[in-house]
Image (tube, grey):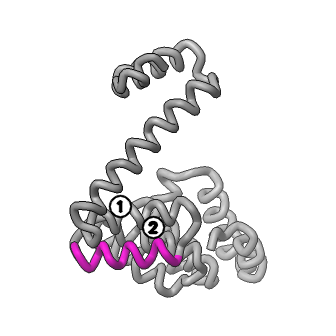
Amino acid sequence: MALLSLDRVDDAIGQFDQSLVQNPNDLDVLCQVARLHMSASLSIMQKLMEIDPDSFQLHLLMGEVYFNNHHFEDSVKEYRAALAKRPDAPGIHFAMGNALRNLQKIDEAEVEFHTALKENPNDYGSNQYLGEFAVGRHEFSAAVPYLLLPVLRGPARLARTFCSASATYNLGDSQKAKAETAGRRSV
C-alpha cells in the first residue's frame, strides 16, 4: 500500500504478486490487484475514447465489455461497428456469432460461425456450435463434420452428446437420438 501511495503501481503489483505466491487465496490482495488492473483498463479505455471515439479498437473492446456483462445486443452492435472499420479483422465473427447465439438468433449466429471457419477451419468453438445447431435440428449427418474436431479435442460432455446421438441414430432410433440431444444442446 505504501508503494501505491508513492504512485509506484508496477512495484505494488509486483509486491501483491509475491504475496499471492505465498497465499493465493488472500482476498484482500486479490481485491487490490483486481482494483489496480480495473483502474488501469478504464484509464486506457478513456484514452482510446479521447483519441478516437469511433476507433476499431474501442468498438472491439466495448463489444467484449458488453458481452462479458451479458448485454449481447449492445455487444453485437459494437462488433458490427468494429467490422465496419476492419472487415478482415480475425476473431470478430466468432465473437459476434457467440453473442448472437446467446440471443437465440441461431440463423444469424450460423452465418457468423461459417465466416469464422473461413478465417480458421480448425476453430474449435465455431465447429462445436455449428455441430450443435445441426444436432438441434436433428440433422445428425450434417453435424458430423463440425463435431469431429471438437470431439477429438474437446470436453467429455460434447463427446458424450455426439457419440450417444450418433449411436442411437445409427441403431435406427432417431426419436430417441433427438430426445437425448435436446437436453444437451447449448443453443
Q: Which of the numbered marks, if any, corresponds to residue 122? A: 1
Considering every residue shown, the one lying at the far top of the view is: 22
Q: Is residue 143 visible?
A: no
Considering every residue shown, the one lying at the far bottom of the view is: 107
The amino acid at mark 2 is Asn
Residue at left 46%, top 70%? 146
Q: Nearer the viewer, residue 83 or 71?
A: 71
The amino acid at mark 1 is Asn
Coordinates of residue 137 in the picture (x, y in percent): 62, 84
Q: Nearer the viewer, residue 122 or 51?
A: 51
Q: Quadrant of residue 175?
A: bottom right
How many numbered discs? 2
Q: What span is in magenta?
A: 73-86
Give left or right: position of 44 versus 124: left
Coordinates of residue 20 in the picture (x, y in percent): 53, 20
Q: Nearer the viewer, residue 16 or 115?
A: 16
Element at label 2: helix
Coordinates of residue 165 in the picture (x, y in percent): 67, 70
CB of mark 1 within 8 Å of CB of mark 2?
Answer: yes
